Image (cartoon, rainbow, N blue to C red):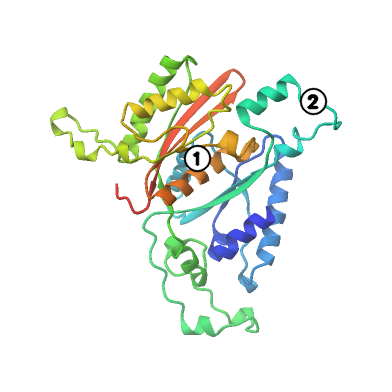
Amino acid sequence: MQQLLSDVYTTAPGAAWLPHYFEANPQLEGREQLEMLKQAQLQAIANQDFEENSPSPEPRFFPGSGALMSRVQQLFQQDPGLPGMVVYAADAPLLTRGIPEDEWDEPGADQEEANQWLGKPGYAAVAMIFLRENLPVPEPVSTQEVSQDAYTPYWEKQQHYGDERWGRVPLQWQDTLAQLPVLAELRLGEQATIVHKQLLPMTRQIHTLFDNALVNAGLRDYPFSSDDKDEAKDQAESIAWLVHNSGDVDVGGTRLAAVSSALQQYAVPLNPIDDASNCVREWGDVGSARSVLQVAVAVVHSARLAAPAVLTEFDRQGDTEHFSVALIRPQEQSA
């Protein structure tokens, strides 16, 4: 965690003043996690040259459940003065279920089933910076502030934060956030509990959710009447990549077939095998970091292809299975 946050602060020092939301690991005690996160953040801050006005770490758990984009938007709506946030996650099932007690031990039936649905035990640490749209251009740093250095007594230093929409981010660090390349725009997703696990009913349910997600992303026209429909606004065929966690080939066929059928009904041209990232196979089981990792993978591919990517997530909790779908659009593509 310390290395992850150090990399974030090196890239964008201003991020150290943004609220930090961590995807909680249900296998660990809450207060223990928060203390670990605080110490990691303190060390990462100490590695930077922030001088006396260093940020005070207050890591929090990422609230809510379900699609990450909906949770991020809810935080922005709840706090209109929030300029942005750091959302991060880390987990290592490799250390818990990936190491046999004896080198001759063979994986049991439960372990084999988990490997097929979740992937082989792995690990991941991922962080993303989310910024509010239309943040103001940072004000120029005054000559007096520039002339201050580490030898200037703190009582002689004048801390100026500029436009209040930048929140607690000091003026001299706001530009490090403003200059970050905007890789993608995340649009609200749709989510539901899978009612039937057979192919046809699952396809119908996913089709409805995908239809709503296209509207949310501005890739499908939804007029009040059919006479007002603008076919030019239907851009589902511009989707170029799929990110999913359907599972390994032996168990995830029905899931992937349902997703593929829903995409085909909107003439999405991608191949669900060749033009897709199956995080179960590519990354393995990354535990509580899975959802944040999948969003990051979708953002990377959307930016790489300069085209929308569709993100689908399956989440089994006992006998209940949840599904969500969302679209990630490259910044260059206007809605």
Amino acid type for the residue under numbered disc 2: Glu
Which quadrant of the structure image shows residue 218? top left
Q: Is residue 228 above or below residue 153?
A: above
Is residue 14 toward the left or the right of residue 209 in the image?
right
Question: Closest to the observer: 32 or 294?
Answer: 294
Q: Which residue is mark 2?
A: 106
Residue 194 horizontal/vertical position (percent): 48, 20
Residue 38 horizontal/vertical position (percent): 69, 54
Give the distance between the C-alpha atoms of the residues marked 2 and 1, in whole angstroms: 36 Å
Residue 168 horizontal/vertical position (percent): 52, 62
Is residue 40 toward the left or the right of residue 303 in the image?
right
Callout in the foreground (2, 1): 2
Q: Residues within 10 Å of mark 2 (few under 14, many from 20)?
A: few
Which quadrant of the structure image shows residue 89? top right
Q: Which residue is mark 1?
A: 68
SS of the residue at dot 1? Answer: helix
Give the label on residue 182, or none. Answer: none
SS of the residue at dot 2? Answer: loop
Residue at position x 48%, y 54% from top? 84
Circle 2/circle 1 CB separation < 8 Å: no
Is residue 43 toward the left or the right of residue 247 in the image?
right
Is residue 110 toward the left or the right of residue 197 in the image?
right
Residue 4 horizontal/vertical position (percent): 64, 55
Q: Residue furthest front?
A: 274
Residue at position x 61%, y 80% from top? 155
Residue at position x 41%, y 20% from top? 203
